């Protein structure tokens, strides 16, 4: 049984009132103006950055992600856990998408927004399209392996049956600095 009692933003399934309420999930998400949106993207990126710091404990590259629903409620969080779990697919975005789908009891994440500290790779870009995520908010671009605008652009490929709106460069400096600090501290000595 699905509870479709709200306004059905985005035309997809609402998933009822799944997730955790956040300050902007009172009916005004996403905000109307660019400057108001920027404040919300900054705040969500702060949550993703916080999630990323937890990856450091297991020696994982610090990447964090959060997923919010069409109403701005928090549906899932994830951090890179490849080293911790030995799972090559345990990227922050995939784990956040899985948790969001569990929250909604629905694999379709129509109307949802994924916020991540680093531009997604090929696998994660594919997962975003497969989950029909509406919007992607990126911290730092990845000029070497990014698949949502840098090296490839799989989320806006006209051959795919779904396109994702991309918002880039949110708290870009902080997101990039966290990664640079990690790689500098892990650089092997000659
Ligand atoms: Zn990835």
Image (tube, grey):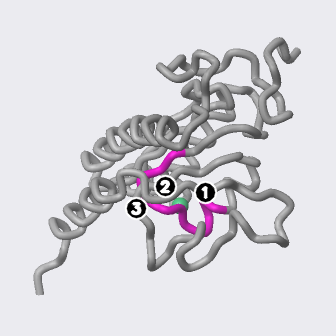
Q: Residue 94's x, y, as percent? A: 58, 50
Residue where numbered disc 1 is placed: 166
Dot 3 corresponds to which residue? 140
Q: Are marks 3 and 1 in contact (CB under 8 Å)?
A: no
**Dot 1 alpha-carbon crowd within 10 angstroms: few under 14, some 14 to 19, many 20 or more:** some
Q: Which residues are magenta?
A: 115-125
Residue for point 42% across, 47% down: 64
**Cα distance in 3D space between marks 3 and 1:** 13 Å
Residue at 59% from the left image edge and 28% from the top image edge: 72
Q: Which residue is mark 2?
A: 138
Q: Position of residue 70 (x, y in %)?
A: 68, 31
In the image, farthest residue toward the bottom:
190
- In percent of the image, x 88 and y 15: which residue is there? 1
Q: Is residue 126 magenta?
A: no
Residue 123 covered by magenta stretch: yes
Q: Residue at x 62, y 64 (%)?
A: 123
């Amino acid at each position: 049984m699905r509870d479709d009692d709200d306004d059905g933003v985005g035309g997809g399934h609402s998933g009822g009132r799944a997730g955790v309420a956040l300050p902007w999930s009172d009916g005004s998400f996403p905000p109307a103006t660019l400057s108001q949106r920027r404040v919300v993207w900054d705040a969500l990126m702060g949550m993703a950055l916080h999630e990323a710091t937890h990856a450091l404990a297991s020696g994982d590259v610090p990447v964090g992600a959060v997923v919010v629903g069409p109403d701005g409620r928090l549906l899932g969080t994830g951090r890179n856990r490849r080293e911790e779990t030995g799972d090559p697919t345990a990227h922050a975005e995939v784990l956040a998408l899985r948790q969001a789908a569990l929250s909604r009891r629905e694999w379709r994440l129509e109307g949802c927004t994924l916020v991540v500290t680093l531009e997604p790779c090929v696998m994660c870009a594919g997962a975003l399209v497969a989950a029909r995520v509406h919007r992607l908010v990126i911290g730092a671009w990845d000029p070497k392996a990014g698949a949502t605008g840098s090296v490839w652009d799989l989320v806006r490929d006209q051959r795919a049956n779904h396109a994702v709106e991309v918002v880039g460069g949110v708290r870009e400096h902080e997101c990039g600095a966290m990664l640079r600090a990690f790689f500098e501290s892990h650089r092997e000595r000659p």
